[in-house]
Amino acid sequence: MSGKKPGSRAPRDPGHQQHIAARRQARAYALQGLYRWLLNGQDPSTLLPEVREFALQSIVERLSTQGGAELSAPEDLSVDEVQAQIRRQAEAEFETCDTVHLDALLSGCIETAPQLDETLRRYVDRPTEQLSPVEHAALLIGAYELAHCVDVPYRVAINEAVNLAKAFGGTDGHKYVNGVLDKAAAQLRPAEVAAARGG
């Protein structure tokens, strides 16, 4: 007898948790890039470097203002040396994000946006161009993962897009994203959805 309660779950592998966190951060950065692209039609080739730089600046600011930076002998360092150390820590923190997934999401969502929007149009109540950029970006990410990332379970793809809409969007935008992607999942992953729903 293992001593586990029936129905209890085994603790998750810390490596698995890091993978989840890295993917979650990649989605958040991708949403920021897609937001810029949707607002001003920015050249996709400049998005990833700009998203990276924006993220690094945000991390540097957080480390600088919240005292999270770990400096070696800070009293002996010049201002430039302190800033260089903080920048290196920010770069290391950024690299904990799943940069491969970030690149795949940004480039994939943009390259396949016409097809993704065609799928989404069946389930939205207005033209996709009239959606808020945050909701539209979250829907693109969710639809892209449903259509192209078979390693991401459909429920995870939906939940992660909903969480993006909660974190960055309007008050009830996440409910809209959830409803649209739930319907789109039945089209994009019919067997997986049917199995999960007992069909």
Image: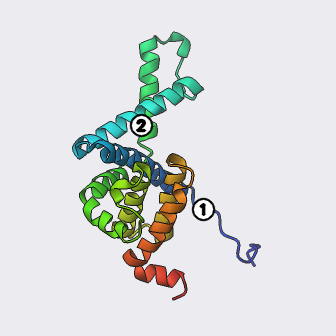
Q: Position of residue 130 (x, y in %)?
A: 37, 54
Q: Which residue is mark 2?
A: 55
Looking at the rendered structure, the secondary structure element under dot 2 is: helix
Q: Kindly report the distance in space between the C-alpha atoms of the residues bearing marks 2 and 1.
A: 28 Å
The foreground one among 5 and 107 is 107
Looking at the rendered structure, the secondary structure element under dot 1 is: loop
| Residue at screen point 26% across, 62% down | 114
Whether residue 15 is visible, yes or no, is: no
The tag on residue 12 is 1
121 sits left or right of 24 in the view: left
Whether residue 10 is visible, yes or no, is: yes
Where 13 falls versus 5 (above or below)?
above
34 sits left or right of 186 in the view: left
Q: Earlier in the sequence, mark 2 or mark 1?
A: 1
27 sits left or right of 118 in the view: right
Q: Which residue type does callout 1 highlight? A: Arg
The foreground one among 117 and 191 is 117
